[in-house]
Image: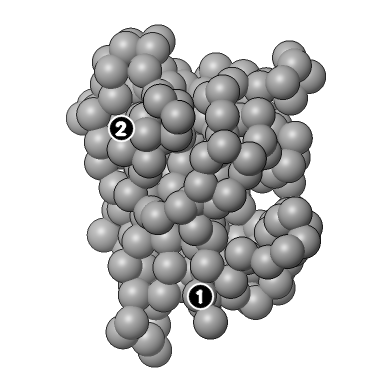
């Protein structure tokens, strides 16, 4: 019961019934043990700086690593196989496998150091439209002759939704993305297409903000997307 109160206090969205704790995922609240929820998303991909102006990609299964009874009730993983490694993630990439009206997206994060955590999100109809030439912390700003290098990362001002939180040392905290901006709509809902992607950029770890923000290493779990009719 104490764990339940702790979780509900951190979240900015209402309640998912996963044994002892409850949250509400809107249209995913069915008597199907959240099978429809898991089917709505491909495994979550991440991009991390390799240190050599390129990215390292990892993939995490939603059910095993990011949302299940154990992660909700224990704020941990059932075994190390499912654990999300602690890294300086630059992009978390959500791939939608269903047409949805997303009201909010929340995620728990934990860092070994207290930090200001800045997140921006960018929606693309497919991966072909997403950034290809990404500016990592290890990426140069200029070519050898001094000519500026143009990267594909969109500016923060183009974000569909953003969030900023203070996270304590080795403490789980959550951020929530909501009130999405999408061309043609003014209701704050993000309308997704099959195969579309939402890039969550951790601004602290972007080469765009190398001189402005302190990089942050973190792990994450409890990926909560609330969709509505």
The answer to which of 193 and 187 lies nearer the viewer is 187
Q: Disc 2 versus disc 1: distance between alpha carbons?
A: 28 Å
Relative side of 101 to 9, left or right: right
Question: Which residue lies under the disc numbered 2?
Answer: 117
124 w.r.t. 16: above or below: below
- Spot occupied by residue 11 in the image (x, y as percentages of width and height): 37, 43
The kind of secondary structure element at disc 1 is loop
- Spot occupied by residue 35 in the image (x, y as percentages of width and height): 77, 57
The answer to which of 2 and 38 lies nearer the viewer is 2
The kind of secondary structure element at disc 2 is strand
181 w.r.t. 62: above or below: below
Coloring scheme used: one colour
The answer to which of 141 and 190 lies nearer the viewer is 190
Q: Say whether residue 133 is visible.
A: no
Residue drawn at x 72%, y 21% as measured from the top left: 78
Image mark for residue 228: 1
């Amino acid at each position: 019961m104490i764990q339940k109160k702790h979780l509900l206090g951190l979240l900015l969205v209402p309640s998912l019934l996963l044994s002892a704790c409850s949250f509400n995922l809107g249209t995913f609240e069915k008597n199907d043990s959240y099978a429809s929820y898991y089917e709505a998303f491909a495994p979550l991909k991440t991009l991390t700086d390799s240190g050599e102006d390129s990215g390292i990609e990892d993939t995490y299964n939603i059910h095993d690593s990011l949302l299940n009874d154990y992660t909700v009730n224990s704020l941990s993983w059932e075994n190390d196989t499912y654990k999300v490694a602690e890294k300086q993630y630059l992009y978390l990439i959500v791939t939608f496998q269903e047409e949805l009206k997303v009201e909010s997206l929340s995620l728990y994060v934990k860092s070994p150091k207290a930090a200001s955590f800045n997140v921006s999100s960018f929606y693309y109809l497919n991966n072909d439209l997403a950034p290809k030439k990404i500016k990592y912390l290890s990426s140069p700003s200029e070519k050898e002759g001094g000519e500026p290098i143009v990267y594909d990362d969109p500016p923060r001002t183009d974000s569909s939704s953003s969030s900023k939180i203070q996270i304590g040392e080795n403490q789980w905290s959550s951020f929530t993305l909501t009130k999405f901006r999408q061309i043609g709509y003014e209701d704050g809902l993000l309308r997704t297409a099959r195969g579309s992607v939402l890039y969550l950029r951790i601004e602290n770890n972007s080469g765009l903000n190398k001189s402005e923000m302190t990089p942050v290493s973190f792990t994450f779990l409890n990926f909560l997307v609330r969709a509505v009719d």
